Image: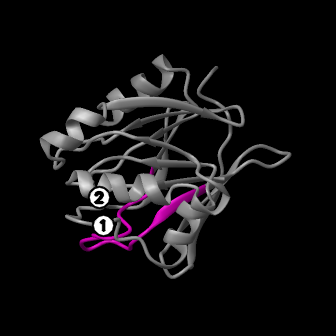
Amino acid sequence: MITVVSDTHGTDGHRLEGRTLAAVREAELVVHAGDFTTEAVLDAFEAEAGAEHGGGEFVAVYGNNDDPGVRGRLTAERTVEYEGLRIVVVHGHEHDDTSLSLLGRQERADAVVVGHSHEPGRRRIGPVTVLNPGSHADPRWYRPGHVEVRPTGEGPTGRLVAPDGEVFDEFDLAATGRE
């Protein structure tokens, strides 16, 4: 399973709770789309990623609110593959829909993960699916959330999940960005 989170905006811990904490611990791959804020928060995420099975892969980018220590350890963009699914990760504060679509196509990605807005959701921009997990810890006026993606025999499926475990969106994640 892939667990996608973003926009923690913490100072000294991961701020994970409930289903979001469990999903991070269960995941084989944890993706964070930036705005940890401090290195202590980044370190806390690294410690929790895949903790239930000896550690999972952790992929993250920095966001516009991350301090210099976080920026020094992360990049602005990452591409990762999992079970045949190719995902580009950016924070999103420097991208509009056109540039996200172009980035996804350029990287031959099936999905682009963004954060920044704190608004959980998914949308299609041309051939690319854009996923925003929202913020599990600082949702502002939106619902708190994270994304879980699981491989299936018919292709990967995803869902948006609140920390209390409520699933508020489910979707198929077709591998279409490579066309």
Residue 87 spot, x, y in % from top left: 53, 34
Given contact means CB atoms under 8 Å apart, are the residues at marks 2 and 1 in contact? yes
Q: Mark 2 Cα within 10 Å, few/some/many (few <14, many 20+)?
A: many
Q: Between residue 52 and residue 102, name the one nearer to us.
A: 52
Q: Residue 123 location in percent, x, y? A: 48, 48
Q: Which quadrant does the C terminus fall into?
A: top right
Instruction: Say which residue appears at 63% left-offset and 49% top-offset.
Output: 28
The answer to which of 84 and 50 lies nearer the viewer is 50
| Residues rendered magenta in the picture | 132-148
Element type at mark 2: helix
**Protein image colouring:** one colour
Asked whether residue 85 is drawn in magenta, I would say no
Earlier in the chain: of badge 2 and badge 1, it is 1
The residue drawn where x is 41% and y is 24% is 103
Residue 60 in which image quadrant: top left
Q: In this view, does 116 lie to the left or right of 60?
A: left
Looking at the picture, does residue 131 appear above or below residue 41? above
> Furthest residue to the right?
153
Left or right: where 178 falls relative to 140: right
- Residue 159 - label: none
Q: Residue 41 carries which label?
A: 2
Q: Is residue 170 above or below residue 129?
A: below
Location of mark 1 (residue): 13
SS label for mark 1: loop
Q: Where is residue 173 in the image (x, y as percent from the top left)?
A: 65, 45
Q: What residue type is labelled 2?
A: Val
Q: Which residue is drawn at 54% across and 31% down?
A: 80
Q: Is the magenta stretch mostly helix, strand or loop?
A: loop
Is 135 covered by the magenta stretch? yes
Amino acid type for the residue under numbered disc 1: Gly
Quadrant location of residue 114? top left
